[in-house]
Image (cartoon, rainbow, N blue to C red):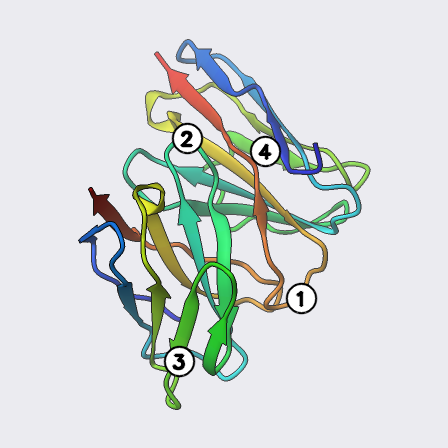
Amino acid sequence: LAKTTQPISMDSYEGQEVNITCSHNNIATNDYITWYQQFPSQGPRFIIQGYKTKVTNEVASLFIPADRKSSTLSLPRVSLSDTAVYYCLVASGGYNKLIFGAGTRLAVHP
Amino acid sequence: GAGVSQSPRYKVAKRGQDVALRCDPISGHVSLFWYQQALGQGPEFLTYFQNEAQLDKSGLPSDRFFAERPEGSVSTLKIQRTQQEDSAVYLCASSSAGTLGEKLFFGSGTQLSVL
């Protein structure tokens, strides 16, 4: 199973762009990279998913280099409501079994 | 609503009691997962169902934990003879297909406290 490594915590300020990088050195050919967001007292919520290059949606962008050994979640112009834990996951097992790490705790300050 | 529903939202049990946690997945979703989340940690995989078949129970911590999904929709996670170390949030998630890359939808969880 591909293991992911990401920073334990990050701090930012309202209006700034936040980039969270995740390492997954032994990612398999068929694995997707997925990011989830979790607020206190809620379950994780899907943010974005990609396989290679760049993916963008209304919430975030995901950058994946050609070797796919890392990925970067980019949150443009964060607000206080973006304070949450962000998980980088690599889907494995053939049926989308997600293995969560400890995640990155993002704190956005006024 | 159209999301994953879990009940009860909070459960307090005395050590040694049996508990049952319910998950109502999104209608039509084939795949259902249970996760356990300790305070300050990421969710840990417990078990996976595809329809009514339990295809992976490798994460269940002991034989006191049992999960079922008899009709391929609602699922119940049962914990027998609860211990203090069972205190955690139990999350249920569902997805529309058992294929790689499919988005998972999580419920808000059941917070279990064993006294």
Pinpoint residue A44: horizontal percent, then vertical percent: 46, 45
Q: Is residue B5 left or right of residue A48?
A: right
Q: Chain of mark 3?
A: A
Count residues near mark 2 (Cα–Cα under 10 Å), then give few for <14, some for 14-19, many for 20+: few
Which residue was labeled with disc 1? B99
State if disc 1 and disc 2 touch (CB < 8 Å). no
Q: Which residue is mark 2?
A: A41
Instruction: Specify the subunit that label 2 lies on.
Output: A
Helix, strand or loop at label 1? It is: loop
Q: Chain of mark 1?
A: B
Where is mark 4, residue-wise? B66
User: Which quadrant is the N terminus of chain A positioned in?
Assistant: bottom left
- Check whether the beta carbons of the residues at disc 4 and disc 1 lie within 8 A of each other: no
- Whether discs 4 and 1 lie on one chain: the answer is yes
- Secondary element at image label 4: strand
**Quarter of the image that includes the C terminus of chain A:** top left
Residue shown at 76% from the left, 45% from the top: B52
Q: CA distance from mark 2 to mark 1?
A: 28 Å
Vertical position of residue B106 compared to residue B11: above or below: below
